[in-house]
Amino acid sequence: MHVTLAFIGEADETLAAKLIVAMQRRPAQPAFDASFDRVGLFPPHGAPRILWLGVGEGADAMAALQAEIAARVDALGVELERRPFHPHLTLARWRDARPSDRHAVDDLPEVGLVARVRIDHATLYRSQTLPDGPVYTPVARVTLARSSA
């Protein structure tokens, strides 16, 4: 599972090489702990398309990391989504949803802490959509600086 910091879309070989170089520079954001502790839906109204598990503790640090990575990608001329960043893990997607499908999630009890993880690196993935689902291949990884905490 992964948290998407910047969705790039199609990239030719030249752009891919530049993205790899950009991702190999250590970010200013040091390593941090993140908790996954709430469930939600995208979009916030109407028929749901995505069920997600959100970040509680560490959300600000993750947003700072995302902003830095997004700025690097943007500097290469890649147009990124302008929606606000909401750090999350995608758990499920609906193919054919109805607004009434929201009730299944709305009726869930509070989930509480699901997982706590150390975020100590960022990875650039190549994704391929195959009939059995997406395949993610790591192509570059950068380790975050050690935190003082």
Image (cartoon, grey):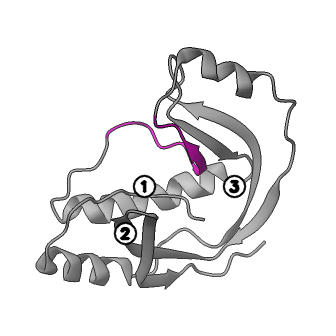
The dot on residue 127 is: 2
Q: Amino acid at mark 1?
A: Ala
Q: Earlier in the sequence, mark 1 or mark 2?
A: 1
Q: Is residue 90 magenta?
A: yes
Is 36 left, or right, of 100 in this rendering? Answer: right
- Find disc 3 in the rendering and name its residue: 58
Residue 32 lies, in percent from the top left, at 69, 67
What is the count of numbered marks?
3
Q: Secondary structure at mark 3?
A: loop
Q: Earlier in the sequence, mark 1 or mark 3?
A: 3
- Mark 1 surroundings within 10 Å by alpha-carbon count, few (fewer than 14), some (14 through 19), many (20 or more): some
Q: Nearer the viewer, mark 1 or mark 2?
A: 2
> Measured along the vertical axis of the image, is residue 14 above or below residue 135?
below
Q: Is residue 137 magenta?
A: no
Q: Earlier in the sequence, mark 2 or mark 3?
A: 3
- Find disc 1 in the rendering and name its residue: 67
Is 41 left, or right, of 131 in this rendering? Answer: right
Residue 19 lies, in percent from the top left, at 27, 75
